[in-house]
Image (spheres, grey):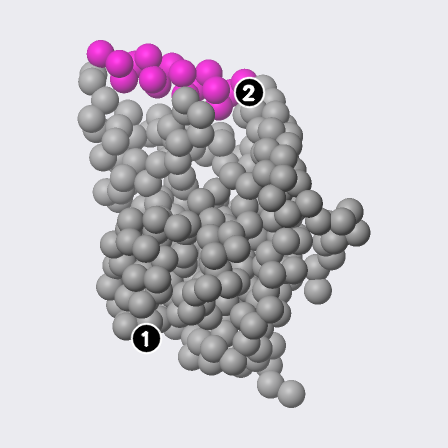
Amino acid sequence: MDEISVTDVHTHTMYSGFTKYSLLSFPDCVTTPRKSVKIAEKLGLKALCITDHNTIKGAVEARAYNKELVVIGEEISTRDGEIIGLFLQEQIKPNLSAEETIEQIHDQDGLAFAPHPFSGYCSCLGQKLHTLRLDGIEVFNSLHRDGYSNAIALKNSNGHAELGGSDAHASSMIGNGYTLFEGNSQEDLRIAIKKKQTSFGGKLTPLHDIVNYSIRIALESSKLILNFNGPECPMSTRVARVRNSYKMLYLFGTFMFAFSPLPIACTFIGDKMLKNRARRTWEKQISPPKSDLDYTLK
């Protein structure tokens, strides 16, 4: 039997831009590509797929640190929901149809899969995935803690490679969800996905990882305001546009948040809200029997 290797097919870096939730807008991730590579090497991953939102800049930078490890990917916003392309040579433009996006991925000899396809709170393909030429489906996303979306994705995975990913938005989350494949190289991973010979595993992202993520965002924002700039990225560009008269107020707010109970309170409240939102969404649209929601990792 060939060696079984581990990869994380869904991770982010500081190039992923900003996320908007309700009235709040905040950096999607503050992890540098170099940090992502170091963590993946420490974990013993054979491949690390960096899939920033609508850009391959983070993946290209990370690949310079370890060409054998890093797979260039992109989480692309389409008009029909998000799609991830792997083994890309060039960036895919957002806001195309799902069909056009997949065609452009395949034109680069890349692979296309549906991330969190039945998410109750992220842009997703839903049942449309059954009409598309996808190479795989993310049936386990460790950041989706709601108990619905992963179970429904697994139930709808027929005919596709089953993939697991962490959807890491912080370095501590890398590897929480993963994909297993035979072999030990990127080409072995590509072949396994194409032949639908993958499996998945991992754990749901612990709440303490999410607490740490929110604290890191506040502290990294403070560094940028104080001109401790790291690599050019969407976050530094956004902060540079803030008027000087507002920067001290922003700085005060970030420190107050980071060194208060707010990260813990916000994490627990947010987790509860997202679970309720997912439950309402999928009970209305699918209404699976309770037994179908009992999700156990392979």
180 is within the stretch colored magenta: no
- State the residue at coordinates (52%, 80%): 195
| Quadrant in the picture for residue 231 | top left
The quadrant the N terminus occupies is: bottom right
- State the residue at coordinates (38%, 28%): 25
256 is within the stretch colored magenta: yes
* Mark 1 crowdedness (10 Å alpha carbons): few <14, some 14-19, many ≥20: few
In front of the other: label 1 or label 2?
1
Q: Main secondary structure of the magenta part?
A: helix
The residue furthest bottom is 1
Residue 296 sits above or below residue 266 on the image: below
| Quadrant in the picture for residue 163 | bottom right
**Residue 144's x, y, as percent?**
58, 45
- Front one among 167 and 75: 75
Q: Earlier in the sequence, mark 1 or mark 2?
A: 1
Label placed on residue 109: 1
Q: Is residue 35 visible?
A: no
- State the residue at coordinates (32%, 55%): 97
- State the residue at coordinates (33%, 40%): 17
Residue where numbered disc 2 is placed:
262
The answer to whether marks 1 and 2 mark residues whose Cβ atoms lie closer than 8 Å is no
Amino acid at pointer 2: Leu
Amino acid at pointer 1: Asp
- Distance from label 1 to label 2 (Cα)? 46 Å
**Residue 116's x, y, as percent?**
52, 52
- Front one among 128 and 30: 128
Label placed on residue 92: none
* Mark 2 crowdedness (10 Å alpha carbons): few <14, some 14-19, many ≥20: some
Part of the protein shown in magenta: 245-260
